[in-house]
Image (cartoon, grey):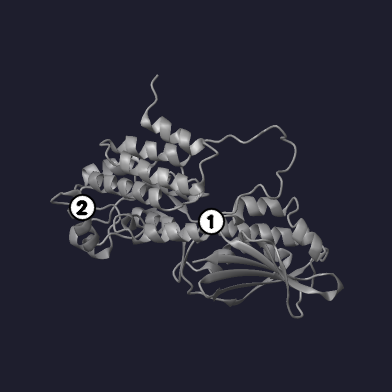
Amino acid sequence: MAKTKYDFIKELFEDKKVNQNQRERILELASREISLESNLEERVQKIEDILFIDNPPDNTLPDLPPPQNIIKYIDPINLYNALHAYNQNPILKTTCHPISSANIDIIVHQSGSREYDFKKHLELIKLNFIDLAGNEKFTTKMYMLIKNYLTGEGTWSSQNIKASWGNKDIEEWANRNPNIAPNPEDSLIEATENEGYKLEKEFISKLTNKPIRNFNELVLYFKSLWHIKDDNPLQRILEIRNSDYKYEEWANIQFIDFSQTLNLFTDVDKLVQAYSKIIELIKENSNRNHQEIVISYYEEGSKKILSIHQLNTSWKKSISDTIERPFGNSMLPLIENQINGLCDLHIRAKFENNQNYELNLWDGKERKAKLIPMFDGVQYLLILKK
């Protein structure tokens, strides 16, 4: 069978001689070429095929852990930029906020219709997401979460939600309710006397403990998975995690200097997982029955920092060993599965001989130790970039 232009593009992406700048240029040219196609579903599929080529791992040594330098550093700023761009796009914004009359005007204008049409709205959503994914560096996990939420091709979030913009039941609802948006804000509800689409199956958000009963609540739940702000406060999310996982049965966890208003686009699900992994590391590595832990969340310049500070302890390795071999069997999965692409990770700690250091465990730079003043305990700093 003759090769198509898409086979050629995939081969270029798989060629190890092609550097990152060349890959970005190839992707830009491929996106332009695909934009000339007329079939929406084919365009979506071809973009996905190019962006997420399956590269099976080398299984020659399946029983050995990967070398500590095999994980390629992913800058967290990419995730922030991608989610910020999603939130600023006037069409994609309608998938994470209740829809207003002003939103309806934009949708009608861009779809070339005279009235709101759900099918044309959904087509615009998919096209805008394809364009955005071609220009922004989403993590694979976040890309798949958003894609499944928009298309219904799979479940999304750690709760494996099936409800989406692309489900057949919402399409059937739209056919019965022409010219009505599925997630209208209050003014549209009053004007149309229609509250929008109600979910076939309700559920409770594990992040916020709020019930999700209709499409308005669903889009806000979706937004809560990647936007920390005053009406989705991180402290409340972590308090729920502490309660659900019974951390306070063995630790006194206090929230001190914890901002309730800092605004940040990030992978909230993964951030909570990272928090849990560190709390579990503290328990695993502690001899004391009851731990004192202080949690803080604050701003330093353009960075937001989530601090997990275990008091009355010290770091169990020498500073030279930590620089050379920082990741044990417990720490390496944390870096690979939660930290990388989400945030940078530093520690401040008391080491042997009462020496106190801050060390950049994971930030894409050479690891270096910096002497700091007298310090109590071990502090994990999750540095979220903006």
Q: How many marks?
A: 2
Q: Residues within 10 Å of mark 1 (few under 14, many from 20)?
A: some
Tell me how far mark 2 sits from mark 1, CA to CA: 33 Å
Q: Residues within 10 Å of mark 2 (few under 14, many from 20)?
A: few
Residue marked by disc 1: 269
Residue 281 placement (x, y as % from top left): 72, 58
- Residue kind at label 1, given as amino acid type: Asp
Secondary structure at numbered mark 2: helix
- Say if 273 sits above or below 262 in the image: above
- Say if 139 sits above or below 345 in the image: above
Depth order, front residue of 172/47: 47
> For this view, does 289 lie left or right of residue 381?
right
Q: Quadrant of residue 256?
A: bottom right
Residue 183 placement (x, y as % from top left): 30, 55
Query: Extreme top residue here?
Result: 1
Query: Extreme bottom residue here?
Result: 373
Instruction: Indicate which disc, 2 or 1, sits on the residue closer to the N terminus.
Output: 2
In this rendering, the label closer to the viewer, 2 or 1: 2
Residue 305 placement (x, y as % from top left): 58, 70
- Residue kind at label 2, given as amino acid type: Gln
Secondary structure at numbered mark 1: helix
Depth order, front residue of 160/125: 125
User: Mark 2 touching mark 1, by CB under 8 A?
Assistant: no
Can I make out residue 257 in this image? Answer: yes
Residue 316 placement (x, y as % from top left): 82, 63
Residue marked by disc 2: 110
Residue at the (49%, 56%) spot, across then down: 205
- Say if 52 sits above or below 261 in the image: above
Label number found at residue 143: none
Depth order, front residue of 204/83: 83
- Say if 298 sits above or below 169 in the image: below
Residue at the (74%, 64%) spot, across then down: 250
